[in-house]
Image: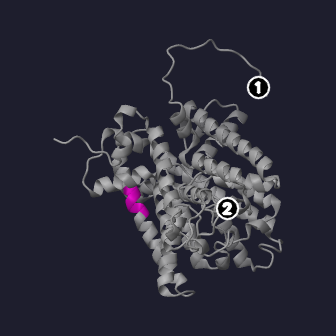
Amino acid sequence: MRSLVSPFPKITGFRFLKLAPPQILVLGFAAVIMIGTLLLMLPVSSVAGEPLHFMDALFTATSAACVTGLAVVDTGTHLTGFGQAVILVLIQIGGLGFMTMATLFALVLKRRISLRDRLILQEAMNQSSMEGIVRLIRKVLIYSLVIEAAGAILLSVRFAFDMPLPRALYYGLFHAVSMFNNAGFDLFGGHDNSLTAYVGDPVINLVVMFLIISGGIGFIVMSDLAEYRRKRRLSLHSKVVLSMTFGLILTGMAVIFIFEFTNARTLGPMNLGTKIWASLFQSVAPRTAGANTLDITGLRQATQFFIVILMFIGASPGSTGGGIKTTTFTLMIGAVISMLRGREDIVLFRYRLAQERVFKALTITLLALLLIVAVSMMLSTTEGLPFLMILFETTSAFANVGLSLGLTPELTQVGKILICLTMFAGRLGLLTLAYALGPKQGKPLYKYPEGKMIIG
């Protein structure tokens, strides 16, 4: 009998290296980015017929594989159909995860998934156990293809009113994949145009927001919703994700609507219906799609800073989005409320959460803040631009959003490297990177005596 075959033998097959799952994920994503960089450097990828500069190709490949959307060269005007196809493949691999795509090929070829591969999938999908992991991957692939296909059809029909049918079909497919994977890449030209021409279009707004939210709530929640009619209940995870997601959307919509209502560069000249559509869309997009129907540079500074907060929170675990995740934010809010009420336990929907979860949420939040602060400080030195612009771009890179105030096309070589590393860290997750660089140690066999320290 032949031994179990790994979907990625070139990576997982090196058993003598004894790589941990987080290390394999880091190396796998790095390999995908480097392959994408080499393909984008081919003359056939550029409209000008000349190879892209290595740093521009690396930045673009990193942004696509990390489903961010920040771009130093415009996708619609600088890249050929081949170059755009490379971007699309990188987005799909980056959104679903390279191990998920590898599992797809293994299932198609009817290969068995080894225990080691299941461990890597568990890490990639941020699951607490391997139980049902392959079944979950099958659902991920089915849900993704169905939703992307439906989005592509609806967008193609709408675009067909504005452009020739072949182009409409291509635009529909590209933008459906980009929006579902929360990538933010578009083909409309310009670094900040995105979907501004469709600011009041109900079809484009509804379809794109549905794609963004579907990709952002996570595949575990999708599975729960799909089986709700049979089970008649939702898990605690799904309840938290859905309630926080829609709570943030409604709050964001209200804040943007109020702050920008009289702004002549954004909502001011619009009628009431268009203002509502624009406010709703711009509340959904920072979580972490990167599309925009309003001119981001024209927003008031208070709104821009509020969007920084939305980007920092991001999407949900097991999704195509980034950020610290809605569950982490919910847990931090729960910890604050419990402390103010003098309670020891955090209770959500009548479930008590273990302290280990609180420590993990605190660690993720603090690491994210430290990374954003450190990169922002370095960019302030290398770029010499207003701090809010730098903070906005850094948070957008970390949360894999792709919204920009115009800094990315003007980045220095050092700035591009810093943003690339930030996108990479944001997509993989800071804890995954930390475990990859220094594997998690086992539990100590002893405890130190308890000490007392004054807090606050």
The amino acid beneath tag 2 is: Leu
Q: Nearer the viewer, residue 377 or 319?
A: 377
- Residue at the image point whose x is 37% and y is 52% from the top: 102
Q: Name the residue carrying label 1.
A: 455
Was residue 81 drawn as part of the magenta stretch in this picture? no
Percent x, y of residue 69: 60, 61
Label 1 is placed on what type of residue?
Ile
Q: Residue at x 69, y 53 (%)?
A: 413
Q: Farthest residue toward the left?
A: 1
Q: Which residues are magenta?
A: 139-144
Residue 16's spot in the image, x, y percent?
A: 36, 32
The residue lying at 75 percent from left, 56 percent from top is 306
In the rendering, which numbered label is found on residue 79? none
Residue tagged 2: 403
| Residue placed most toward the observer, 439 or 12 | 12
Q: Position of residue 282 (x, y in %)?
A: 68, 66
Determine contact: label 1, label 2, CB under 8 Å.
Answer: no
State which quarter of the image contains the N terminus.
Answer: top left
Instruction: Bin the neighbour count of mark 2 within 10 Å (Cα to Cα): few under 14, some 14-19, many 20 and up.
Output: many
Q: Quadrant of the C terminus?
A: top right
Q: Secondary structure at mark 1?
A: loop
Q: Position of residue 94 (x, y in %)?
A: 49, 55
Residue 231 seen in the figure: no
Give the spatial CA distance, label 1 vs label 2: 38 Å
Circle 2 sits in a helix, a strand or a loop, which is it?
loop
Residue 108 visible in the displayed image:
yes
Up-down relation of residue 445 to residue 64 (above or below): above
Crowding near pointer 1: few (<14 within 10 Å), some, many (20+)?
few
Q: How is the image coloured?
A: one colour
